[in-house]
């Protein structure tokens, strides 16, 4: 990384130079008796950057929301307390934090605090969310919305160390730009695989099923209702998961695959019962049930009564209107 400043004793100078890398902010010594000895190294990559920063004094930092980027902060030593709106955390070695893009920042660093700071452009996060998950970020992705993001940041920290911090090609970005662009996308994906404000949107998209898939599933049931088919068989045929199939039927049919298949079988059984009566064809009711995929006669009679308000034998006898 390149040196931004070294052994700076002027808080205003350090604040200005750090602000030129990130954005303008306020920096104050917590005690007037403290002496600053600040150091910063920095390396811009593409849509990310890597910094190493230490003030060697107890300091207080305040900033307006970032708007256009996120910061993942990994203390090498010491600790700092961070408050973003009503969310408060303490970061220390082995306990990284991420600063959201749309919240006020209030930090207090201990005098021995040194941070590795990884900056990600908001556009990188938003674009990765859209391209990888099909979700448009109408509101900024918020990572500090639950207590579940730490475990994901642990994994992210390992990836950051392996792919960027200890990458021997970091000093030769010009000839390895494509590799680092891919690395940036992988790191953005790593963050989005954890807890954040758009997880539910991802889940909805993940299990969204297009109407044509439901049509194919219904066609498969029409062709195979007499066989012992399962929901998994139907899902396999249309190349989606059983859970996605379930969600799709709930959305487009206000039903479930099992209930739809059962009603289909009952309709076919009713058609055969009426046909056998009208044509005076001697087909046993139990045989009709089996032809329509019911292998337990008691269940067949129970479901038939629930569906049509009469027993199969009443339909067969024609003692009252069957249709």
Image (cartoon, rainbow, N blue to C red):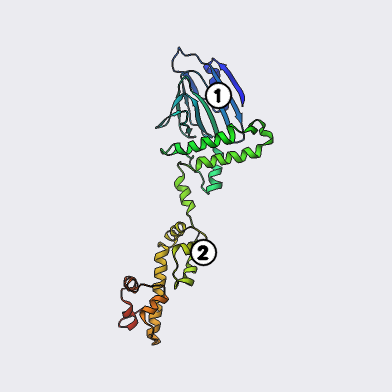
Q: Earlier in the sequence, mark 2 or mark 1?
A: 1
Q: Quadrant of the C terminus?
A: bottom left
Of the two numbered discs 2 and 1 in the rendering, the one whose residue sits closer to the viewer: 2
User: Is the Cβ of the residue at disc 2 closer than 8 Å to that at disc 1?
Assistant: no
Q: Which residue is mark 1?
A: 18
Nearer to me, 211 or 46: 46
75 in relation to 148, above or below? above
323 in relation to 216, above or below? below
Task: Specify few, some or many for label 1: CA neighbours under 10 Å numbering under 14, 14-19, or 20 or more.
Answer: some
Q: CA distance from mark 2 to mark 1?
A: 58 Å
Q: Residue at (40%, 87%) from the top-left corner?
A: 279
Q: Which residue is mark 2?
A: 237
Residue 248, percent from left and from top: 45, 59
Nearer to me, 149 or 167: 167
Q: Residue at (44%, 57%) from the top-left corner?
A: 243
Q: Residue at (55%, 18%) from the top-left corner?
A: 13
Residue projecting furthest to the bottom: 280
Secondary element at tag 1: helix
Residue projecting furthest to the right: 175
- In this orientation, does residue 212 appear? no
Residue 14, percent from left and from top: 54, 19
Residue 315, percent from left and from top: 34, 80
- In this orientation, does residue 264 appear? yes
**Left or right placement of residue 319 versus residue 103 in this view:** left
Task: Specify few, some or many for label 2: CA neighbours under 10 Å numbering under 14, 14-19, or 20 or more.
Answer: few
Q: Residue at (47%, 31%) from the top-left corner?
A: 94
Secondary element at tag 2: helix
């Amino acid at each position: 990384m390149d040196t931004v400043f070294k052994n700076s004793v002027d808080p205003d100078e350090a604040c200005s130079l750090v602000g030129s890398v990130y954005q303008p902010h306020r920096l104050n010594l917590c005690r007037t008796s403290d002496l600053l000895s600040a150091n910063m190294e920095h390396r811009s990559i593409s849509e990310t950057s890597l910094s190493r920063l230490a003030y060697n004094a107890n300091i207080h930092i305040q900033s307006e929301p970032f708007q256009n980027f996120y910061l993942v902060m990994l203390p090498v030593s010491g600790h700092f307390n961070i408050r973003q709106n009503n969310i408060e955390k303490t970061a220390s070695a082995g306990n990284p934090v991420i600063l959201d893009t749309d919240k006020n920042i209030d930090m207090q660093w201990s005098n021995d605090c040194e941070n590795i700071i990884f900056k990600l452009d908001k556009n990188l996060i938003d674009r990765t969310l859209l391209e990888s998950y099909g979700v448009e970020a109408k509101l900024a992705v918020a990572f500090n919305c639950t207590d579940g993001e730490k475990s994901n940041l642990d994994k992210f920290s390992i990836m950051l160390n392996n792919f960027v911090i200890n990458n021997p090609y970091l000093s030769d970005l010009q000839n390895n730009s494509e590799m680092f662009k891919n690395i940036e996308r992988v790191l953005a994906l790593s963050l989005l695989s954890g807890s954040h404000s758009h997880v539910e949107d991802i889940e909805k998209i993940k299990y969204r099923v297009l109407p044509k898939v439901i049509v194919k599933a219904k066609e498969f049931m029409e062709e195979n209702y007499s066989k012992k088919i399962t929901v998994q068989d139907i899902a396999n045929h249309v190349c989606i998961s059983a859970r996605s199939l379930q969600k799709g039927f709930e959305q487009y049919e206000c039903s479930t695959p099992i209930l739809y298949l059962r009603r289909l079988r009952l309709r076919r059984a009713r058609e055969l019962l009426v046909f056998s009566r009208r044509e005076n064809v001697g087909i046993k009711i139990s045989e009709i049930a089996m032809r329509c995929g019911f292998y337990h006669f008691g269940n067949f009679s129970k479901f038939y009564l629930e569906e049509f308000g009469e027993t199969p034998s009443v339909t067969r006898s024609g003692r009252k209107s069957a249709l």
